Image (spheres, helix red, strand yellow):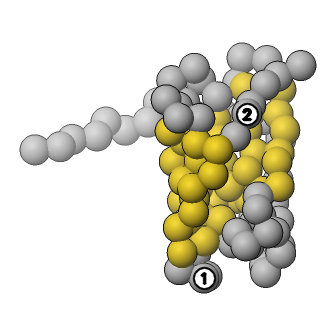
Amino acid sequence: SLSIAEPKGQPQQLGSAKGFLDGIQLSSEGTLFYTDWEALRRTGKIGWIDPATQYQSKISLPGQIQNPSDILFDESRRAFLVTDLLDNQAFCFFVKISQP
């Protein structure tokens, strides 16, 4: 059976991202990816935060993805799989991610 211990200490905020945040994934390199609706029925974005450096950025999603919710980053293919909650669709697109 599964058991989860009580959390210790206070939650820690990662970065200063604000918006209509939804899905979240932590990569094997420690980068935190999240989806942001920005506003209902507008083009959504994917944001990322490097917890070690606090560097953060966002990219606009292809126009048909307006309400991004769940997110999966396929590290081997450098591709995001994102669901659009209100339109009940799933999308896959490839990205190049680099930091300054």
Identified by mark 2, the residue type is Lys
- Compared with 88, 98 (above or below) is above
- Left or right of 12: which side holds 60? right
- Residue 12 picture quarter: top right
Q: Nearer the viewer, residue 90 or 26?
A: 90
Q: Secondary structure at mark 2?
A: loop
Q: Name the residue beneath numbered marker 1.
A: 87
* Residue drawn where x is 76% and y is 58% of the image: 61
* Residue drawn where x is 64% and y is 28% of the image: 31
For residue 53, say whether it is visible. Answer: yes
Indicate the position of residue 91 as horizontal and vertical percent values: 57, 63
Of marks 2 and 1, the one in the foreground: 2
Q: Name the residue beneath numbered marker 2.
A: 96
Identified by mark 1, the residue type is Asp
Give how far apart the Cα atoms at labels 2 and 1 are: 26 Å
- Compared with 39, 60 (above or below) is above
- Left or right of 27: which side holds 93? right
- Residue 38 picture quarter: bottom right
Q: Name the quarter where the C terminus is drawn.
A: top right
| Label 2 crowd (10 A; few <14 / some 14-19 / many >=20) | few
Q: Name the quarter where the N terminus is drawn.
A: top left
- Compared with 29, 70 (above or below) is below
Indicate the position of residue 8 as horizontal and vertical percent values: 47, 30
Residue 99 badge: none
